[in-house]
Amino acid sequence: METDILIAGCGCSGLYCALHLPSDCQVTVITKADEESNDSFLAQGGMCMLTGEEDYDAYFEDTLAAGHYENDRASVEIMIRSSQDVVEDLVSWGVDFQRDEQGQLMYTREGAHSKSRIVFHEDITGKEITSHLLMEAKKRPNITILEYTTLLDIICSDGICYGAVIRRADGTLEKVAADNVVLATGGVGGVYFHSTNFRHLTGDAIAMALRHNVALKDITYVQIHPTTLYVKEKETRSFLISESMRGEGAKLYDKNGNRFVDELLPRDVLTQKIQEQMQKDGTDYVWEDLRQIPSEELDSHFPNIIEHCRQMGYDVYNECIPVVPAQHYFMGGIRVDHESRTSMPHLYAVGETACNGVHGKNRLASNSLLESLVFAKRAAQDMAKESGRRDAKAQQAALAQVSLDDYRDGNRLEEEYRVAVQKVLGVH
Ligand code: SIN
């Protein structure tokens, strides 16, 4: 197959990148599972935005303080300054953020934010955004989405990316010649025992980067979300109890029903406090009291979380729920510059698999959707600047030297990638 741009991953970063490429550019988006099984669809709390010039310094400082001042400051500035344009884009494509009676955007709050600046749609903001991006992408004749199609490797020669090896839904292996390849493969939660991520998100692009000496950055910076619903049996995926519930007043209690912590501490600090409390109490969880949120707010803002708790046997209007920290987000990843270029020419990385340093050591809540969208658009704009097609002869030679036989044993490759990712992340 030949395509102008191959994008691996159809979460919000992959789709937003595709949507900002020129209409005469042939874009192929592949995804390992169905088009909705990506972490962007799971994002609950919302997306940060600059609410007004008077909030710029505080938003910048909150992002840096949460990130232990290890953030790339230029990335943070780009993200914050681009946020209003992103919201405008999304609204123009039909994304419905919560508004007040005057039609003004409403904002919620999460941990480590000094003020409310998070736009939201109930407790399913990621689904609202990503489903609209998907709808928009399907209207575009230049964008093709291939489900159950897996990126197995990138094809490169002399340190330049020329395409990729993929496995189609029917199991067929194929080489793809592409002018540019964009890695938008999401997080690494699939290599952890407890994670809020889809299980098939195993950091494949990280393994490919290791294989081909593409630079990585902040590779051990992994975020644990403080509050996921505790269940005794091992689940396929930990269910998030959104931080915005604590932002709206939910409280945390020890085994005796006493508050033991400021619920709006940055995620890494709060996670540590909860783990210490569990150890002290000899419990596998702490309690979260959602009854502290006015019931009208619970009903209108968090209907899906309440329903999930009900299905798991909890009546959140009358009792506390057990919560426990779980792996949630990867701040590190494939090192990229401000245009999302990796260290390998013609290879880009966007979204959770990429690291432009915006989050530093610990991501500020609800900066992930925004960061993904902002830097995906910049990748598209950068690719659009390129004039003319690639050196076809060099590309053909690079593809010719790859044997598909090396990719026939899918299980072996999957295991090899999993082990490589676990090793580099320090997961045991
Ligand atoms: C949440 O709703 O708590 C998750 C939002 C995020 O990961 O930023």
Image (spheres, grey):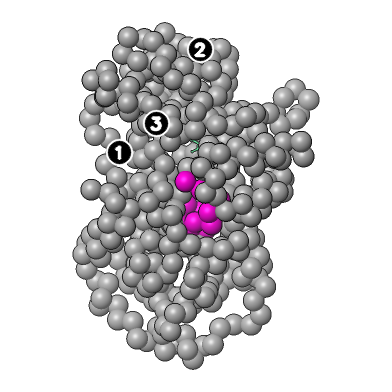
The answer for how far apart the CA atoms under marks 1 and 2 are is 28 Å
| Residue 49 found in image quarter | top right
Position of 158 relative to 219 (above/below):
below
For the point 40% across and 46% down, which residue is it?
A: 222
- Residue type at numbered disc 2: Gln
Number of residues whose C-alpha sits closer than 10 Å to that of mark 2, classed few (under 14), some (14–19) or many (20 or more): some
Residues in magenta, as a range: 350-361
For the point 60% across and 37% down, which residue is it?
A: 62
Where does label 3 land, which residue?
Answer: 271
Where does label 1 land, which residue?
Answer: 194
Where does label 2 land, which residue?
Answer: 292
- Residue type at numbered disc 3: Thr
N-terminal label among 1 and 2:
1
| Residue 309 found in image quarter | top left
**Label 3 with label 1: CB-CB less than 8 Å:** no
Position of 290 relative to 34 (above/below):
above
Residue 50, position as x, y percentages in the image: 70, 40
Residue 174, position as x, y percentages in the image: 36, 74
Is residue 61 visible to the viewer in this orientation of the structure?
A: yes
Q: Nearer the viewer, mark 3 or mark 2?
A: 3
Residue 283, position as x, y percentages in the image: 25, 21
The answer for how far apart the CA atoms under marks 3 and 1 are is 14 Å
